[in-house]
Image: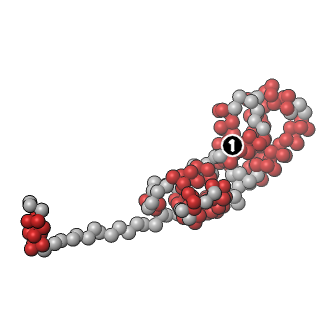
Amino acid sequence: LKTSISKEDLIVFVNELFENFELAYHFNFSKVYDSQNKIDLAKRLWAKTLKNFNKFQLQMAMKDVFLNNEYLPTLNEFVKLSSQQALSEEIPSVLHAFDEARKSYDPHVSFKWTHPIIYFAGKKVGWNNFHDQQKTLVMHNFKNYYLEYAEQAMNGKTFKLPHIKTKPKEKHFIDRETFLKLKEKLNL
């Protein structure tokens, strides 16, 4: 995402993350990072690796780690956790959005979407492709469209679902003579 965390915010985040790691996982942390040089190298590596996530995702991943991990997470574990986070308070994660799009039904515009961009990404991929094509290919295409729309939404663009035009039900009347013949035929 182009709306990823700024360099300044990333530095602040990584410093805060490592301070919290040291407090929460003291013995484990001091074994892994036994010198200031190792800590500095690790911080640079973590910052370089996490730069494509946005601030919200990183904050949620950090919260998740401290609530659920007994041990100091690896960088790989933290990256996986970050990628599973929602993109913002309003915009769900790619995986959540993909599952929602797969489970939606016709008419898709009437489905109760978590966010309208899920509908637009699903429509762009093609609703039939969710069930007809290989899941990894569809997921790849969906992710690209979804992240494009998510970035636009996070930059202020409003997405509204198209309004469904419902036709009034046509009333079919039969004339009195046909009705009486039918009634007689059915012995009513």
Q: Residue at x 68, y 48 (%)?
A: 83
Count up the numbered dots.
Answer: 1
Q: Amino acid type of disc 1?
A: Leu
What colour scheme governs how the chains and residues are painted in the rendered image of this protein? secondary structure
Q: Is residue 147 visible?
A: no
Q: In the figure, 39 relative to 105: above or below? A: above
Question: Disc 1 on helix, strand or loop?
Answer: helix
Give the x, y percent position of residue 35.
90, 33
| Residue 23 in which image quadrant | top right
Q: 174 or 19, which lies in front?
A: 174
- Name the spot of residue 44 as percent of width and height, x first: 84, 46
Q: Is residue 44 visible?
A: yes
User: Is the residue 117 above or below the residue 10 in the image?
Assistant: below
The residue tagged 1 is 81
**In what quadrant of the picture does the C terminus appear?**
bottom left
Q: Is residue 83 above or below residue 126?
A: above
Say which quarter of the image contains residue 67.
top right
Instruction: Estimate the x, y position of residue 76 in percent, counting from the top left.
Output: 77, 42
Q: Answer with left or right where residue 51 lies relative to residue 167.
A: right
The quadrant of the picture occupied by the N terminus is: bottom right
Q: Decide which of 176, 161 is in the foreground and name it.
A: 176
**Front residue of 26 and 9:** 26
Which residue is at 84% across, 46% downward? 45
Q: Nearer the viewer, residue 43 or 185?
A: 185
- Left or right of 126? Residue 72 is right
Q: Residue at x 69, y 45 (%)?
A: 82
Rendered residue at 29%/69% (across/down):
168
Instruction: Point out residue 166 in the picture as x, y percentages from the top left corner.
Output: 35, 67
